[in-house]
Amino acid sequence: MNRSTRSLAMLGGWVLALTSAVAQTVFAASLGQTTLRPSGEDGPVTVYYASEGPEQSVRRGRVMLQLAVDAPADPGNGRLVVISHGSGGSPWVHADLARALVNAGFVVAVPEHHADNYLDDSKPGPDSWTVRPAEVSRAIDAVGRDVRFAPLLQLDKVGVYGMSAGGHTALTLAGGRWSPARFAQHCAEHIAADFPACVGLLTHLTGSPLDDFKQWLAVKVIRSRFDDERLREYQDARVAAIVAAVPAAADYDLSSLALPRVPLALVLAEKDRWLAPRFHGGAVRNACRTCVVIADMPDAGHGSMLSPLPPDIRGIAGELLNDPPGFDRGRMAEVDRKIADFFARYVPAVGAPAGNGSQATAANARRP
């Protein structure tokens, strides 16, 4: 190797080292976290963001997280993603996805859905599904009013991720139409096959003679509570792309989801015991002509979407949320990255060109 060649090699090595150092600096940003105060009937909004503040171990709910609590926010890509949590859920079980989104440049907001969260689960199901989409809109507004985040964001294009009941929220924002009466009709027709979706954690089928009575009573109560046939729909023009993970969907007019109004991606779990895939996420996949399937995991369950998963979940909740035997939870880091990539394409950084739209990915829509 002559002197000129050695000099070029050294220069190339120096550039590579510098590029690597810059990349590590970008992705070494701490996960900042703060909470916006409740307003009216709206609960608090948890916000995750990039920060140079030091992370510390903090307990949130039943999990330990590494967070830079209330640390100053760093500029990102100028875009917001809202996460809609599941029934009885919290912002803490989506912290790993939030970190992936923050590493991709996003600020992440998680509204606490009224009377359907880990502190108050008194009104789950259609009562909550009716009000959740507007709560997402008001969470966007709340972040936009905050003096720490308003200068960092443009809110004309926002991403929405929802899981389970949050997936139901996401499908409504994508243009889906549903009614409480459709939910009641589904449960009347499929109570045995989709019992947890209709009843939740109140009770479960055990194979005993009491099962017939449980099913009869469940259908009777559901029909008495949910007889409104008016189709619910909701739009927020700021929502530019949506990901629905293991969504509750049996009460939708599936034709309304054939051509979503914005790019829509799905994350599915074939061993979901809470929301039978053939009635919910799988039904949406089959009906939707432009949806992108980010992941369709044959060995994942409903709670596989929760990361971190709270420890020592027992009883009916444990049966429905704990990972199926053999599931590799390490896979979820790659799923989170793909979700972040999807939003980066369709909710591009401020000043960057937009993606090619959902039609451009239609050829790959069925490929996880």
Image (spheres, rainbow, N blue to C red):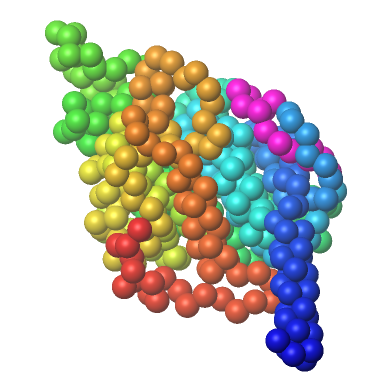
Image quadrant in which the N terminus is located = bottom right
**Residue at position x 47%, y 77% from top?**
356
- Say left or right for 208 vs 288: left
- Say left or right for 262 vs 102: left
State the count of labels: 0
Which is more toward the observer, 364 or 174?
Answer: 364
From the viewer's perspective, is residue 75 above or below residue 272?
A: below
Decide whether residue 64 is among the magenta residues. Answer: yes
Q: Which residues are magenta?
A: 59-71
Decide whether residue 26 is among the magenta residues. Answer: no
Rendering quarter of residue 214: top left
Which is more toward the observer, 360 or 141?
Answer: 360
Residue 320: x %, y % from top left:
36, 26
Residue 351: x %, y % from top left:
69, 76
Residue 191: x %, y % from top left:
21, 28
Image quadrant in which the C terminus is located = bottom left
Which is more toward the observer, 327 or 72?
Answer: 327
